[in-house]
Image (cartoon, helix red, strand yellow):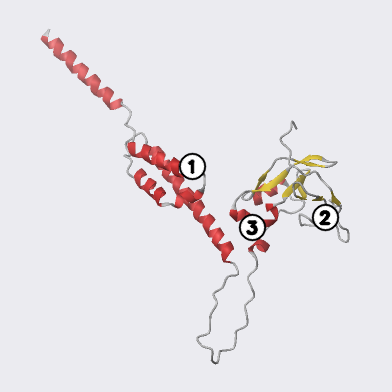
């Protein structure tokens, strides 16, 4: 009997040891704290939060997560998300700096009012970045519009055009870099007809339509040579989604 009791105790110990080995790894309190801090920094949804010292602290805390914890994989994914967000934020800042710095040159003042060296021939001013930036072109398909301009343009609510009904439009995103590169579309929208760029419209104002779609040129407001496009009074207010 005593031998049987020892055997049963040994088997029970082995069972408990085996269950402990199969137990899930513990959660990481470091990851939980880092994730809460990350959510607090990203409340406004702006990428600028990725470049703050507080986000640096989040990355440092994620690096302390035990690789054996159940949150180790989630910690690595969050660190990757933060690094990708930093890359986007830095690219955005570089684009803004480039747009603001065009045409700015340091001014060299003469050392004295005496004899001065002859002025060198002035270098031509650098072109306005807006002039170098492609714009939506007349006749461009929706696929081409999306491929080339989805960074700054998105589909908007359909607009009612007199005698034509609802027409799809694309509008400018509310981003500083987009307003700088496409200032025309701060107040205007891209008007589509038959799946192609057809013109521009200013909501609540008059809309200019191409007089001859087949003969219009490459620009979004192109008109047939020698013929002015008619201006048509339009109730150009965006409409809500319909059943179409």
**Left or right: where 43 falls relative to 75:** right
Q: How many marks?
A: 3
Q: Is residue 149 above or below residue 12?
A: below
Instruction: Give residue 75's quadrant in the image.
Output: top left
Q: CA distance from mark 2 to mark 1?
A: 47 Å
Q: Are marks 1 and 3 in contact (CB under 8 Å)?
A: no
Q: Provide the secondary structure element on which disc 2 rests.
A: loop
Q: Farthest right residue?
A: 227
Which label belongs to residue 43?
Answer: 1
At x 24% / y 21%, what residue is drawn?
Answer: 16
Residue at 68%, 47% (x, y): give it: 171
Residue furthest to the top in view is: 1
* Dot 1 or dot 3, earlier in sequence: 1
The residue carrying mark 3 is 181
Q: Relative to residue 118, is residue 172 depicted above or below?
A: above
Helix, strand or loop at mark 1: loop
- Assess disc 2: are there few (<14), some (14-19) or many (≥20) residues with their C-alpha within 10 Å of its C-alpha: some
Query: Could you say which is closer to the camera, residue 94 or residue 72?
Result: 94
Q: CA distance from mark 3 to mark 2?
A: 24 Å
Sequence-first tag of 2 and 1:
1
- Residues tagged 3 and 2 counted as in contact (Cβ below 8 A): no
Toward the viewer: 89 or 213? 89
Q: Which residue is mark 2?
A: 216
Image side of residue 221 versus residue 75, left or right: right
Foreground mark, 2 or 1, reads: 1
């Amino acid at each position: 009997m005593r031998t049987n009791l020892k055997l049963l105790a040994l088997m029970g110990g082995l069972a408990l040891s085996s269950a402990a080995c199969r137990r899930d790894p513990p959660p990481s309190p470091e990851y939980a704290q880092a994730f809460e801090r990350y959510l607090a920094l990203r409340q406004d949804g702006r990428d600028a939060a990725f470049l703050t010292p507080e986000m640096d602290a989040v990355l440092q805390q994620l690096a302390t997560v035990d690789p054996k914890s159940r949150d180790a994989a989630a910690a690595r994914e969050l660190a990757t998300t933060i690094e990708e967000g930093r890359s986007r934020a830095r690219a955005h800042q570089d684009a803004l700096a480039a747009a603001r710095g065009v045409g700015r040159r340091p001014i060299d003042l003469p050392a004295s009012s005496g004899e001065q060296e002859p002025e060198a021939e002035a270098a031509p001013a650098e072109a306005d970045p807006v002039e170098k930036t492609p714009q939506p072109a007349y006749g461009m398909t929706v696929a081409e519009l999306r491929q080339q301009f989805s960074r700054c343009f998105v589909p908007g609510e359909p607009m009612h055009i007199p005698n034509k009904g609802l027409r799809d439009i694309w509008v400018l995103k509310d981003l500083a870099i987009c307003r700088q590169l496409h200032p025309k579309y701060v107040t205007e929208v891209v008007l589509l007809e038959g799946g192609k760029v057809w013109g521009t419209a200013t909501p609540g104002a008059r809309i200019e339509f191409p007089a001859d779609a087949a003969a219009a040129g490459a620009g979004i407001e192109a008109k047939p040579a020698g013929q002015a496009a008619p201006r048509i009074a339009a109730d150009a207010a965006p409409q809500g989604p319909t059943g179409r």
